[in-house]
Image (cartoon, rainbow, N blue to C red):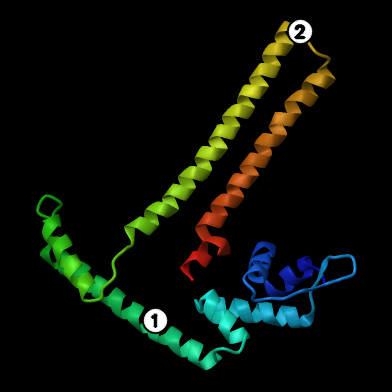
Amino acid sequence: MKIKQVEELVGITRKNIRFYEEQGLLSVERAENGYREYSLKDVKRLQEIRFLRKLFIPIEDMREVFEGKKSLTSCLEYQVEKMEREKKNLTQVQEFCETLLQEKLTLEELDAEACLERMEQLEKEGTNFMNIQKTDVHKKKIRGAFLGAGIMLVLMAGTVGMILWGNSVDPLPIGWLLFLIAIPVAFVIAILVALRARLNEIKGGEEDEASKY
């Protein structure tokens, strides 16, 4: 079957199916014409992948399970232990916030330096607070996407302006004028579509998530 049918059957996007192939989680045979031909076995594997991903199982762990290097039981046991650690960490962060709430501090009364010292002590004891560096990188990617798209949009707007200026100096047949304007307009539409896809990828695409594993 074709990839479009697989998308509908499994509920995984074409981009992520390709990603799982690149990661070695899925090996798809090709027909004589060179196109991928997905089998029911591939559909089953993608369903397994989707199931494990919903349990936050890392890509590398899934690969070892599929290759027989690790059992599903041991993989799930490790995941439960990891969740227990994360739950304990969230509890400690929550208790820290509740302590501050009980003091009913205003911003003027807040001793940020003392709070940071206390947080650093908790971090030494194993508590993890927000990773500011990671968050900043995420925002940097979004800014970069908008900046790149903005530059291209300005260039296209300049192109349209030049065409209109040239037409005011030496008028073109209306057909040619519309054709010339349609080219940068088509580029603008393509840029906006690409920007939207990039933002979706940054916010939740598997490609960015892979860095965690």
Q: What residue type is labelled 1?
A: Met
Q: Residue at the location (66% across, 62% down)? A: 15
Q: In which quarter of the image is residue 133?
A: bottom left
Percent of width and height locating residue 1: 83, 73
Q: Residue at the location (25% across, 76% down)? A: 126
Q: Is residue 65 left or right of 171 when viewed as pictured? A: left
Say what secondary structure mark 1 lies in: helix
Percent of width and height locating residue 43: 73, 78
Q: Is residue 206 left or right of 29 when viewed as pictured? A: left
Q: Distance between the residues labelled 1 and 2?
A: 70 Å
Percent of width and height locating residue 101: 17, 65
Q: Which residue lies furthest to the right in this view?
A: 32
The crowd level at tag 2 (other Cα within 10 Å; few <14, some 14-19, many 20+) is: few
In the rendering, which numbered label is found on residue 83?
1
User: Which residue corresponds to mark 2?
Assistant: 170
In the depicted structure, whether residue 57 falls above or below residue 101 = below
Task: First in sequence, mark 1 or 2: give its number.
Answer: 1
In the depicted structure, whether residue 39 falls above or below residue 22 = below
Q: Is residue 204 left or right of 188 when viewed as pictured? A: left
In the depicted structure, whether residue 104 falls above or below residue 161 = below
